[in-house]
Image (cartoon, rainbow, N blue to C red):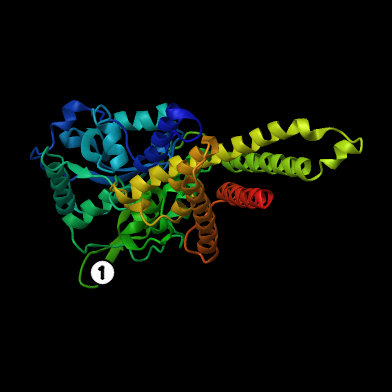
Amino acid sequence: MNILSGKKIYKIVLISVFIIITIFAIPAQDKELRYRAGLKITLSQSSIISMITVYPGDQIYSLFGHSAFRVFDPENGIDWMYNYGTFDFTDNFFILKFVQGKLDYYLDIGSFQRAFRFYSITESRKIFEQVLDFDLEERQALFDFLQKNGEPENRVYRYDFIWDNCSTRIADAIDKTFPGFVDYSAYRGSGESFRKMIMPYVGGHPFINFGIQLVFGKLADQIPKGHELFFLPVYMKQAFSAAVIKKGDNETASLVLKESMIASPDRAFHKKTDYPFFIFLSVLIIYFISIILQYEIIFYKKRKQSGGINSAVLLKPARFVSALCEGFVLLFTGIMGLLITYLWFFSDHTIASLNFNYLWCTPLNLILFAGIFLKIKSSFKKYLFVFLNNLAMIMCVAYLACIASGAQYAMAAFFPVILLLITAEIKKYITILSLKKIKE
């Protein structure tokens, strides 16, 4: 994102934040098998259909894991993976569609063994297999559904991070093939909100976590119910383990016939320090020191006359440092305000709507940023900037009130920024009053 410094950094961080929202994908893996979609194949008695869960990896696109179907039938020479998490990265309008929330994903039919090697060896990720307890007729019905779903006219869908992704499509395929056949009600989930369910997955990427928490709105603080829990592959794996299927009028059986970890490479995930918090806290501390130094110089100039240290030479550098801190925060929050505006009002990213962070990350701050460098002479412009300063301060206070009431989650890294914004507005207000008194 043009977020921390310059257009290049803004673009990089923007892509990083929203690649988090498209995390369940790998490239298409076998072009020949892709064109086998729609073929009429009769499965043998030895066939099995499994749900494959790939655990999180280190790369941005793999942070939340992945889900797919595996159809294995040695008599027909089939060992295919049905992957709903594929998109065309070479699309000329990829970035635009990406930001707009209009990026299409599609079902790809590829070699399971090739995918297995990619996940387990290349990326060192765990792979868990759950063999579904379907009889031959049920397996054939699900297989036919997947084959038809893989045809060019059926394979594309509009991706949504929460409600329609590669993981939710697995459960949807079963429900569409066998409506009401599977009962997931025994699985209750963690009882946490969408936002808190996501947090452990981005603990090793503090800047990505900061971006996600900033652009996600109030909807992310809802507690998922039913199929909404399936937006994360590991949670859906747990739901499948607890699910039952109807075998008769009053008989049920486990959905999963057997399950096992088929790849378990050694790896460790480490939660990293909350770098954004310490960066913004450092800026806030430097800002406070520069302000204290300025007022020490302004209100105690008599020390110079009494033979004390001539600290007036530090006034200009102190003002420069405070202006630099203010400018950095105003520019950052202003740019983020533009991003939140677009995501909320103009994109299809439903999870980014109703975002209370808009009260302090607002495009209004870009105007205030410009005011640092402008020489305002007309009375109208002066009153305009006074009004905007007051409005910005009121919005920050309103945000703190909303957070205190539990309206939306706020991470610790937000508060040094908000405190600096409020302090800057108060400082400007005091400066204006001081100038008025001098004139009088």
Looking at the picture, how far across and down is residue 254, in whole percent?
32, 60
Name the residue nearer the viewer: 385 or 222. Answer: 385
Name the residue nearer the viewer: 289 or 201. Answer: 289
> Which amino acid type corresponds to the residue marked 1 in the rendered image?
Glu
Q: Is residue 73 visible?
A: no
* Residue at the right extreme, as displayed: 307
**SS at badge 1:** loop
Looking at the picture, how far across and down is residue 184, in whole percent?
32, 62
Looking at the image, residue 287 sits to the left or right of residue 411; the answer is right
Q: Quarter of the image holding residue 159?
A: top left
Q: Quarter of the image holding residue 105?
A: top left
Looking at the image, residue 167 sits to the left or right of residue 387; the answer is left
Looking at the picture, how far across and down is residue 304, in whole percent?
86, 36
Looking at the image, residue 427 sits to the left or right of residue 213; the answer is right
Name the residue nearer the viewer: 263 or 409. Answer: 409
What residue lies at 46% left-to-right and 60% top-to-bottom?
Answer: 190
Total label count? Answer: 1
What residue lies at 81% left-to-right and 40% top-to-bottom?
Answer: 301
**Residue 404 to residue 134: above or below:** below
Name the residue nearer the viewer: 133 or 53. Answer: 53
Q: Residues within 10 Å of mark 1 (few under 14, many from 20)?
A: few
Looking at the image, residue 221 sits to the left or right of residue 87; the answer is right
**Residue 94 to residue 240: above or below:** above
